[in-house]
Amino acid sequence: GILFVRGVPGLAEAREALLPLARRVALLPEEVLRKYECERAFYGVGWSRGKEKFNGKPDMAKGSFYANPLFDEPAQGDAAVLEKYPVATPNVWPAEVPELEGAFKRLGRMVHETAKPVVQQIDKLVAGVRPGHTTALYDKTFTESRFTVSRLLHYYGISEEDGVGEWCGWHNDNSTITGLVPAMWLEEESGLPAAPQAGAGLFVEGRGGAQVPV
């Protein structure tokens, strides 16, 4: 399911500070971006582009920067944890965009805090049909786990000739809860604000087929 949360204090300012940096990172030279790729973490830490597939082809339409906004070293140096959970690889931050780390952590932590009361309500719903559940979901997610991942996305300018499809295939997010913030539209060359085209952006499709813009 999906729900909307409004009125989060400071979110608008944190979003304005972070999202334009996605473009700055994505437009760095390829040889610079390769320094921040992490193959051992399956490209789930640092920079990633073209490592995912979309409609059976490498997805070059977007670039992603991954990091843990809460813990720079989630595994705390434990080699056994790193072996079992490569996503616990320490964060890497591009020296070429020094503002990224602070802005990334600020918004990531804000989304993390906003998710807490949502998951608490889910625990209550589950406990209503599964006696003994108590606060298990909240505890495992926010008390016991250090494996929080945030993803900063940049979508490159494309044309119809690129043959990029519109819909992501069915999939499960590998997390308890996924938090999203509204997209920001920018001109790729200048970085100035841009108006989205009709029908563009993120949509979700309900079980009944209704499509809702996010």
Image (cartoon, grey):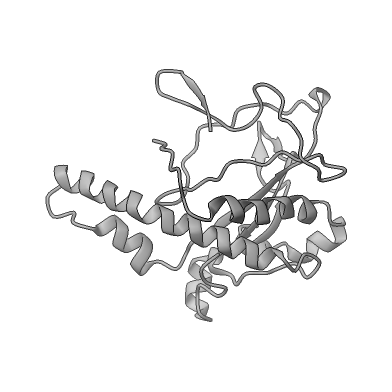
Residue 136: give x, y in percent of width and height. 25, 58
Residue furthest to the left: 131
Q: Quadrant of residue 144?
A: bottom left
- Quadrant where the N terminus sits is top left
Q: In this view, does 206 lie above or below 34?
A: above
Q: State left or right for residue 1 relative to residue 190.
A: left
* Residue at the far bottom in the pictured view: 77
| 73 relative to 192 in the view: left or right | left
Q: Which residue is drawn at 33% across and 62% down?
A: 140
Please state the horizontal and vertical placement of residue 207, each as a whole percent of the image.
40, 23
Q: Residue 106 at what x, y percent from top left?
A: 57, 63
- Say left or right for 13 vs 191: left
Residue 203 sits in quarter: top right
Q: Position of residue 195 (x, y in %)?
A: 73, 31
Write the residue at 62% across / 58% down.
66
**Residue placed at 71% from the left, 38% from the top?**
185
Number of numbered discs on residues: 0
Which residue does the image show at 55% across and 75% down from the upper left?
73
**Residue 80 or 163: which is nearer the viewer?**
163
The answer to whether 4 appears left or right of 155 in the picture is left
Q: Which of 33 and 201 is in front in this view?
A: 201
Nearest the viewer among 147 and 152 is 152
